[in-house]
Image (cartoon, rainbow, N blue to C red):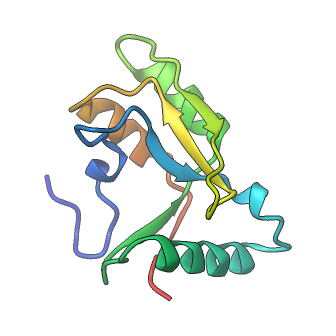
């Protein structure tokens, strides 16, 4: 089933062939005072690192919720790890580990935990 236009799809939470973790940003490491400032800062980081598509989205997740949902609802009791993995040009960069290639069920579970979403474009 395809998500309606503009909505985040589960495929956003699946590893690409050359990835060992799902690249994410840990917003608290941005040291902003509110969500609006965090989103503005993430948009700036993204625009400096890569080309952001017009329909690209920023999904807001809670690490504890994601880990608990996947641990309790995945058939293999998957224990995801979320690690802060800063880059020179992105100090908030982090990764979600213990994912497998083509793991649609885990991607769907992660999608179910999305709290908010924003356009990734400036």
* Image vertical order of residue 29 relative to residue 89, above or below: above
- 9 to the left or right of 58: left
- Which of the two residues, 81 or 8, is positioned nearer the viewer here? 81
Res. 119 in view: no
Q: Residue furthest front?
A: 88
Residue 96 appears at what percent x and percent y?
51, 36
Residue 104 appears at what percent x and percent y?
24, 35
Res. 56 in view: yes
- Which of the two residues, 93 or 113, is positioned nearer the viewer here? 93
* Image vertical order of residue 62 relative to residue 27, above or below: above
**Quadrant housing residue 105:** top left
Residue 31 appears at what percent x and percent y?
83, 65
User: Which residue shows up at 29% across the image and 57% down it?
Assistant: 9
User: Which residue shows up at 66% across the image and 52% down it?
Assistant: 26
User: Which residue shows up at 44% across the image and 36% down it?
Assistant: 21
User: Which residue shows up at 51% across the image and 78% down it?
Assistant: 48
Q: Residue furthest top?
A: 76
Residue 42 appears at what percent x and percent y?
60, 72
């Amino acid at each position: 089933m395809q998500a309606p236009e503009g909505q985040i799809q589960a495929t956003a939470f699946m590893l690409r062939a050359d990835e060992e973790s799902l690249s994410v940003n840990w917003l608290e490491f941005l040291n902003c005072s509110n969500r609006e400032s965090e989103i503005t800062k993430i948009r700036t980081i993204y625009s400096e690192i890569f080309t952001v598509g017009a329909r690209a989205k920023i999904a807001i997740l809670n690490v504890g919720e994601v880990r608990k949902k996947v641990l309790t609802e995945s058939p293999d009791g998957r224990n995801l790890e979320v690690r802060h993995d800063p880059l020179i040009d992105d100090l908030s960069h982090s990764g979600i580990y213990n994912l497998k290639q083509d793991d649609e069920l885990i991607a769907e579970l992660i999608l179910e935990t999305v709290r908010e979403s924003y356009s990734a474009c400036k």
